[in-house]
Amino acid sequence: MYLPLVAGVDGSEPSLRAVDWAADEAALHGVSLLVLYGALWERYEGSALARELGKPIARVEAEDILRAAAERARRRRPDLLVTTETVPDEAEHGLVCAGRNASMIVVGNRGRSGVADRLLGSVSRTVAAASDCPVVVLRGNHDDRAVAGRHGRIIVGLGDAPTSVLQFAFTEARLRRVPLTVVRAWRCPAHETVDHPLLTGEPARLYEERAAKELEAALEYAPSDIAVRRRTAEGPARSVLPAASSEADLMVIGRRAHGRLGRVAHSVLHRSACPVVVVPEQR
């Protein structure tokens, strides 16, 4: 049984663009799409009161938003099975719970708060940090499409525990039929050159070589049907990866399984020029 892909909506334009992207991704993977809206109307107003007085305004709004989002997905992908659900909970908690039985979650960069798009919304940040499944946060100008991007390239940041993130990236590259660029950032501690001015450059070369070896080791069993490009880059990963995102249609990064975003993931989610997938490390 294939797990559905979940798209979180709240009626905002970023969330409706997420529905477009999610519909493409679900069709690409051959799974159904669940459009989810988190609302607290039932918790605050009470189900008995709702039955007595008729549907509360918040529930009507939720139904309207879900209906519009589902119709949008079906128009985009007529053969896609689309279902909807309203959960009586905060949006982030509802999405994290749904992610326990989902293949992927797709959310917009921001919701209806009206804050500048360059910032990251609390829902997308929380879901990316806590979900059991990969989470796509739609950063940058992605043209509302999960396929046929402008750059024809996926970039993955190689961390210290690469298995889950690489497997995800391989699958996405294969489905899209695009090359995959694997980036390993490296840094030379400043004290190793400051104390030895005559050796400036030598320690840096050693660190770069180490990064290249780590890259080769991680990709030793890379699938032969995918064009994999290797890249080492000097600098902190939290700066290297956002810079590389301007050349990609999708940025894939990993996340520890403890339910928190590290500094690298946090920076990439705030600064990426393309959609970002946060892949949790398998427990």
Image (tube, rainbow, N blue to C red):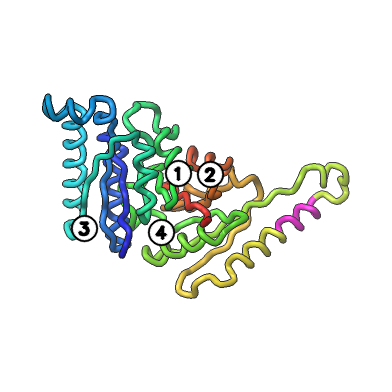
At 35% across and 34% down in the image, what residue appears?
A: 90
The prevailing secondary structure element of the residues shown in magenta is: helix
Q: Would you name the residue on which mark 3 appears? A: 80
> Label 4 neighbourhood size at 10 Å, few (<14), some (14-19), many (20+)?
some
Q: Would you name the residue on which mark 1 appears? A: 128
Q: Secondary structure at mark 3?
A: loop
At 76% across and 58% down in the image, what residue appears?
A: 206
Q: Is residue 160 left or right of residue 174?
A: right
Question: Dots 2 and 1: beta carbons under 8 Å?
Answer: yes
Please report the bounds of the magenta region as a residue range. Answer: 201-208
Sequence-first tag of 2 and 1: 1
Q: Secondary structure at mark 4?
A: loop
User: Which circle marks residue 152 in the picture?
Assistant: 4
Residue 20 vertical placement versus 266 (above, below) = below
Q: Would you name the residue on which mark 2 appears? A: 265
Residue 181 appears at what percent x and percent y?
Answer: 52, 60
Marks 2 and 1 sit apart, C-alpha to C-alpha, by 9 Å
Marks 1 and 4 sit apart, C-alpha to C-alpha, by 25 Å
Which of 5/189 is in front? 5
Residue 233 appears at what percent x and percent y?
Answer: 63, 53
Q: Is residue 91 left or right of residue 257?
A: left
Q: Secondary structure at mark 2?
A: helix
> Label 1 neighbourhood size at 10 Å, few (<14), some (14-19), many (20+)?
many
Residue 277 appears at what percent x and percent y?
Answer: 44, 50
At 58% across and 56% down in the image, what residue appears?
A: 158
